[in-house]
Image: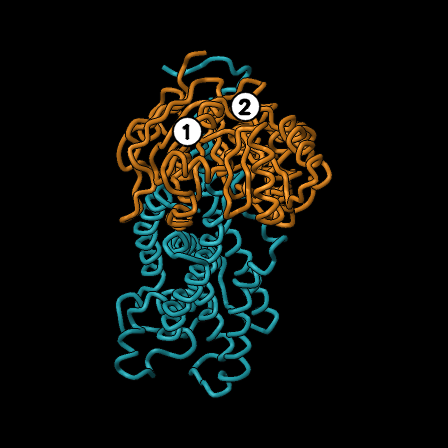
Chain colours: A orange, B cyan
Amino acid sequence: MTEIAIQTEGLTKRFGDFTAVEDLSLEVRDGTVVSLLGPNGAGKTTTVRMLATLLRPDAGHARVGGCDVVTDGPRVRELISLTGQFAALDKNLTARENLILMARLRGRNLRAGRRLADQLIDRFDIGEFRDRLVKNLSGGEKRRVDLAAGLIDVPQVLVLDEPTTGLDPRSRQVVWSTIRQLVQDGVTLLLTTQYLEEADALADRVILIDRGTEVASGTPAQLKGQVGEQRVDVIAADSAAFTALCDLLWERFEVTPAPEQRTISIPAPDEAADLARIAAFVDESQISVDEVALRRPTLDDAFLALTGHTAHEQTPETEEAAV
Amino acid sequence: MTATTTIAARPVRLPSRSMGFVRDTILLTGRSLRAIPRVPERLLDVTIQPIIFILLFLYVFGSAIHVPGVSYKNYMFPGIIAQSLAFGVIGAGVATSNDMTEGVIDRFRSMPIGRLSIISGQVMGQFCEQVLGMVIVVVFGLLLGWSPQLSFAHGVELVGLMVLGMLAFTWAGVLFGMLVRSPDAMQGVGFIVILPLTFLAGTFVPIAGMDAVPRAIAQWDPISTLVAAARALTTPGVHSGGSWPLAHPELAMALWCVLLMAICVPLALRRFNRTLAA
């Protein structure tokens, strides 16, 4: 279990003048889930495309299962399965036909391919739309078929590039539970995401990247520790209420007031329990408030804490445009 | 030093390379062909143009064109066939350009299948589409009263040349389809290049009657060679000449096609390995 599934050293990729990935060194151990977390244009997609042998690195090395992605491409392709940001399916085939095609390209005969496709259809809950053309499926439906297509053979290393971007909350839950199932089965997973929440929910280790380089890494807990904890924000209805609330709350809690926003922040390590306690306390005081809400650290908070600037100050969409 | 560890029962596939190539190519060709009934407008791209030209030249311009020794109908159809052949570049290019922007090609490229079979599947699929389009055009021509005079040997030769021609133009189209930025660009550039070439040739009128400059161009225009080859085999009594390719049209056409493939096939393979489908 200590083998290394993915290893990169000094990995670099440029598109003209734009450096998408710069000197990136990362390591994913067998059987673990590592999340590459970063905003749009951070170099996530470029990185995983290099790992999947779809792009050639300009400098540095990357190995998957010990095989170099440049010199040993065919072996790497046997070990890795990439499910990209955009549905990698034939839009003129039905969901089922796509799965059968992928199974057959992975060496199954027609009968075995059909059987495997039907198993995947059951497992990913595709039955309802299995005979619809992919071009007529919704985003969430496509994503499920796409995930299934990436799991024809359980790969040694599964790479999911922003598996839930653009999905509605329900579809996101479905994808998450599928991913959790895979992880339980022991798949090594590299997951890119823009959502801190997603990395937190799924990953053992998070690598925060920005402008193609690593900014921080660690377990989700460590990373959140660096970023700041979740907190409860109490927003007063007016400035008089704000003053009254401050007077009331500071005796009981560790408050951080922000007068301009009429907001009082209170650390909430116990999340919902703290929220309930604070909400009840505020309610009893009968001071009028606009909102009492639990705030989790967001990617923006993480960036602000670790890089000194927010994720949205980035040159937007450069990565997608360049790729 | 492969990290073979916990993952259970991962079927390892070790077919011989060449068998795998043939099998994967067939599977991927099948994938392309299935798109035909589902996106019939793609076939329309290949057939609507020739049909419009047939109607236009047969019933509008044709009435004013007189070619000695042969009816205009029989004179024109070999030209239409050669023109459709050339338009195949655009059809294959647009379809390839479309396909390359689809994520599915990335999926194939990241799978343990030969990359050569992905591109040959693409070419075979396009080729079949071209053949189907050509059959429709020929049948349409026969229905309108085109009467080619073919001996069996000439028939075989014609089919052989057409197959070679379609393969060459499909490869060229697949290459251009990967080079352009979008299907629209392919369509646009294709028409700017191919359409004038098909008119500056012996497609619809005899080259001999043209002005000096267009005549010189037409004599060496590869499309004139295609037309002359089709005409030499189907329409006895019409001889073009004036340049070496037109004096030996069948051989010249075969050489053109081989040359085109010798250039396009390696470039297409190279391009495909580097292509950056989004």
Query: In the current view of this chain or complex, which residue is farthest to the right?
Result: A128
Q: Look at label 2 and name its amino acid.
A: Val
Residue hosting label 1? A207
Is residue A284 shown above or below B186? above
Choose between A88 and B152: the one closer to the eye: A88
Label 1 vs label 2: CA separation?
24 Å
Query: Dot 1 lies on which element?
Result: strand
Please, what secondary structure does the residue beneath circle 2 have? loop
What residue is shown with label 2? A154
Q: Would you place residue B26 above or below residue B34 in this image?
A: above
**Residue B34 is at least partly visible in this image:** no
**Of residues A27 and B167, which is closer to you in this image?**
A27
Q: Where does residue B116 sit, x and y in percent of width and height?
A: 40, 39
At 61% from the left and 70% from the top, the residue drawn is B143
Q: Residues within 10 Å of mark 1 (few under 14, many from 20)?
A: many
Tell me the amino acid under the disc marked 1: Ile
Residue A86 image position (x, y, % from top left): 51, 43
Q: Quadrant of residue A127?
A: top right
Q: In the rendered structure, the residue with mark 2 lies on which chain?
A: A
| B110 w.r.t. B130: above or below | above
Q: Give how far across and how far down residue B172 sits, in percent.
A: 38, 55
**First in sequence: mark 1 vs mark 2:** 2
Camera-near label (1 vs 2) is 1
Residue A266 x %, y %: 55, 32
**Chain ID, mark 1:** A
Q: Are marks 1 and 2 on the same chain?
A: yes
